[in-house]
Image (cartoon, rainbow, N blue to C red):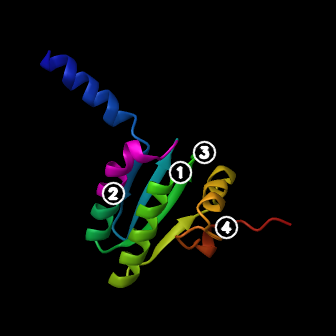
Amino acid sequence: MRKEADSLLSFWRSNMPTTLNQSDQVNTIRLEDNVDITCAAELKNVLLQALESEKELRVEFVGTPELDVSALQLLWAAEREARRLGIGMFLVGRVPEGITATLDDAGLVEFPVPTDPKSVIATS
C-alpha cells in the first residue's frame, strides 16, 4: 500500500503545472497547463520560495491555456510583495488569450504582473 502511495505521489509531482528554475541572478516560474485551485498551494509555495531568494522573478507561460482567479490572486499578491521587497517581478512574453478571458471575467483590465519589455517581440 505504501509503495502505491509513493508511486502516485511521484506521478502527481512530476505532472504539476508549476516549476521554479533558479539561477544566480533570476528565478523563473514556468506555468504549464491549467493552473487552478487544485494546484494553488503548490503555486503559493513556489512563489514564496522565489521571493525568499530576493532575486528578480520572472513568470513564463508555457502552453498555459487557463488560470483561475485563485492563481491570479496569488500572482498579484506576489507582485505586490516583490515590489515591497524591491525585487523586480515580470511576465516573460505575452499573456495567452485564454487567460485574458479570465482577466475580463474577474474585471481586471490588465495582467497583475507587468510584462518585461525586453521579452516582448514587436509585431508589425
Residue under numbered circle 1: 67
Q: Earlier in the sequence, mark 4 or mark 3?
A: 3
Q: Check disc 3 and report its element: helix, strand or loop.
A: loop
Cα separation, mark 2 vs mark 4, equals 26 Å
Outermost residue, left side: 2
Looking at the image, residue 4 lies above or below residue 119: above
Residue under numbered circle 2: 44
Q: Earlier in the sequence, mark 2 or mark 1?
A: 2
Residue under numbered circle 3: 65
Cα separation, mark 4 vs mark 3, equals 19 Å
Type of amino acid under label 2: Lys
Q: Earlier in the sequence, mark 1 or mark 4?
A: 1
Label 2 neighbour load within 10 Å: few <14, some 14-19, many 20+: some
Residue under numbered circle 4: 120
Q: Are marks 4 and 3 in contact (CB under 8 Å)?
A: no
Q: Are marks 2 and 3 in contact (CB under 8 Å)?
A: no
Q: Check disc 1 and report its element: helix, strand or loop.
A: loop
Q: Check disc 4 and report its element: helix, strand or loop.
A: loop
